[in-house]
Image (cartoon, grey):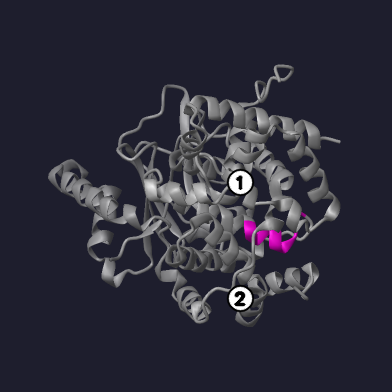
Amino acid sequence: MSDFSPFNSSPDDALAAEFVLGTLDATERAQIEDRRLVEPQLEALIRGWEARLGPLDAAFPEIEPPSGLFQSIEAQIKDRKLKISPANDNLVALKRQLARWRAAAMGAGALAASLFVGLAVENVNMASAPKNFVAVLQKDAVSPAFIVAVDVDARTLTVRPVSETAPLGKSYELWMINDKVGAPKSLGVVQKAGFTKADQLKQYSPDVVENAVYAVTLEPEGGSPNGKPSGAPLFTGRLIQAAP
Amino acid sequence: MAITAEDLSKLLARTGQGDRQAFAEFYSATSAKLFGVCLTLLRRREVAEDVLQEVYAKIWVKASDFEPGRASPITWAVTIARNRALDELRKKTPASLDEMQETQEFAAEEINPLATMEHGQDMAALMRCLNLLEDEKRQMILLAYYRGLSREALAQKFAKPVATIKTWLHRGLAQLRTCLTP
């Protein structure tokens, strides 16, 4: 029993094992699900455990679902584009946050010309602009750090820092992560005033753009030297449709 | 299932290209298994039905990601279903006493992979390694995998502190890993 020191060398392997086993709590699961998208090593550990424990799946029984269920599924996938948000519960809170930030932005006259207000305007016009999405990148539920706005049809993206400035000699870099397109794609270094980018997103399908995770990492000044994130993302978020 | 893994892979590939007919066929070939997964983990039918719908919506979106070389299509789909069901289970506050009761009734022995051995060498190797574990560690691992018991729920069931459960789980899993390493 004591002849072995389980996982001492790799806490991530223990996490991966428990993730696959199913014993992690909601927060830990969510962290793993985000991290695995940007950390190939963790992803490999998870796959290792899926392969080890997977044979257990054979013992799950086969139980016919009620007839008619497939019709509901088909109906769902038909309007899949309309329900992008992975976490509908967050939607209300997020809208409230947006309203608050918009109010703050409106109050600050100096910001009137800023992208921040641009986002607010999009938000107001949401009925007529159904393809506009926003993502709030955050560390946790109460610390919004960046706002990303995407016009999926035009595939243009705007990002604006809300509360973060990079430490001296470092830069924040924005990434689009979608396992459909492989490794994280850099969308550029986030300047203090934010930036508008059209180019990078154009090469991806709207579906990829909509369903991606957007993440910010801390990089050496000027951005990642090798086109890959240097570390785990500090801030992440997914797009939600900026329409009711 | 008369349909082979190769057939399922082809159906997934077509689904990935937006072929609804292929998706419907994939559903009819796999939905009983995936519903079994959801129901076993979630216990409540109406919840399992909702989750099953989400699982297939996800399969529709992710079908083009499936790499035939990496896992069998059914394993891939079961993994999606298990992950989604586990997320659903964890959303809630810790299991109520009623649910615990239900879990108690479903003793670990009832989940007996040995009895349903779908054979294959992987399964045989895993079973051999599981059988080398102490009874309680094995039961914990099976209850977590099949019934979605969290560390807290396991702590209640085995009347041990959560920290002890975590240690046992880690030991048990590490033993499995060592045992399975060729």
**At which x and y percent is residue B181?**
82, 35
Q: Helix or strand or loop: what does disc 1 sit on? A: helix
Given residues B45 and B112, the one toward you in this image is B112
- Mark 1 neighbour density, 10 Å: few (under 14) some (14–19) many (20 or more): some
Place residue A243 in its image quadrant.
bottom left
Is residue B134 at all visible to an observer of this figure?
Answer: yes
List the residue tagged with mark 1: B108
Indicate the chain on which mark 2 is placed: B
Given residues A170 and B11, the one toward you in this image is B11
Which residue is at 79% across, 71% downward? B4
Name the side, left or right, on which A135 lies relative to A96: right
Indicate the chain on which mark 1 is placed: B
Q: Which mark is residue B30?
A: none
Main SS, magenta residues: helix
For the residue marked with disc 2, what is the amino acid?
Gly
Is B1 located above or below residue B180 in the figure?
below
Q: Which contiguous range is marked in magenta?
A: B70-78
